[in-house]
Amino acid sequence: MVSQLSEAVLDVIADALVDKGYILLSDIIPDNVSLALIEKMQAKQNIEFKSAAIGRGSEQQVNTQIRSDKISWLDKQDVIDNQYLSIMEQLKNGLNRRLFMGLFDYESHYAVYQPGAYYQKHLDALKGSQNRILTTVFFLNPNWQAENGGQLVIYDEDDSVITTVQPELGTLAIFLSERFPHEVLPTLVPRNSIAGWFRVSHANHGF
Ligand SMILES: O=C(O)CCC(=O)C(=O)O
Ligand SMILES: [Fe+2]
């Protein structure tokens, strides 16, 4: 069964993106999907995860000074990955209908931050690059304790903290990729998440 995002939830998300550029949600991904994603991550750990790189194309490099998570990309062909991806597809269509954002595709990876891992403050997209438009981060850690660290800190354009997000199971953060610098504080215990980005089609932008 494919879970459905209600029109009311899509309205709330669209309004928040217009008003503030970001939103934190809980309870929009059904528990059975979250649990399947957790199991999937646990099964994959240590086999299929690779050190995450920064930069794009030929400039890609692993730099553990900046980020030290390990990642594994989601795949539409995988039944469990597809449960999450189909909800993101509904989000994409719902936002395009409401805001004419022209979101075209979505790429996402599981990420595991082992004890000591972090991701220094960064933007997910260069201003004006029109590559990554909207970022999503979905957390998969039941009973997260604040003293574990590992929070996602989101800053405004003047580098003041807007919000500090505990990576608790079921929380989904959505924010405009070019607008909000953010960082993952060092975690003391393993921290699991799925980070994803909606992109526009380059074909629509003269490339
Ligand atoms: O896991 C998180 O809280 C955010 C990860 C992140 O910022 C990224 O992968 O670009
Ligand atoms: Fe990021």
Image: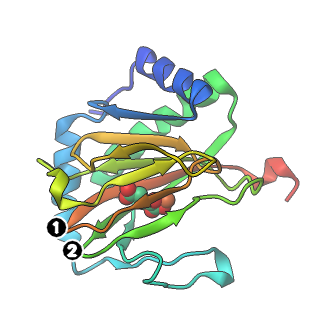
Most extreme residue toward the right, as rendered?
206
Q: Residue at x 16, y 66 (%)?
A: 42
Position above or below: 62 against 192:
below
Q: What residue type is disc 2 on?
A: Pro
Question: In this orientation, which residue lies closer to the viewer: 200 or 134?
Answer: 134
Disc 2, disc 1: CB below 8 Å?
Answer: yes
- How many residues crowd around disc 1 within 10 Å: few (fewer than 14), some, or many (20 or more)? some
Q: Which residue is drawn at 35% across and 32% down?
A: 25
What residue is pinned by disc 1?
A: 189
Tell me the quarter of the picture where residue 50 sits: bottom left
> Residue 115 has which mark?
2
> Residue 67 has which mark?
none
Q: Position of residue 93 (x, y in %)?
A: 56, 31
Q: What whole-number distance in Å separates the C-alpha atoms at marks 2 and 1?
A: 5 Å
Q: Which residue is drawn at 46% across and 47% down?
A: 136
Q: What residue type is disc 1 on?
A: Val
Most extreme residue toward the left, as rendered?
143
Q: Which residue is drawn at 58% across and 35% down?
A: 21
Horizontally, residue 175 falls left or right of residue 125, namely left
Q: Position of residue 20 (x, y in %)?
A: 56, 30
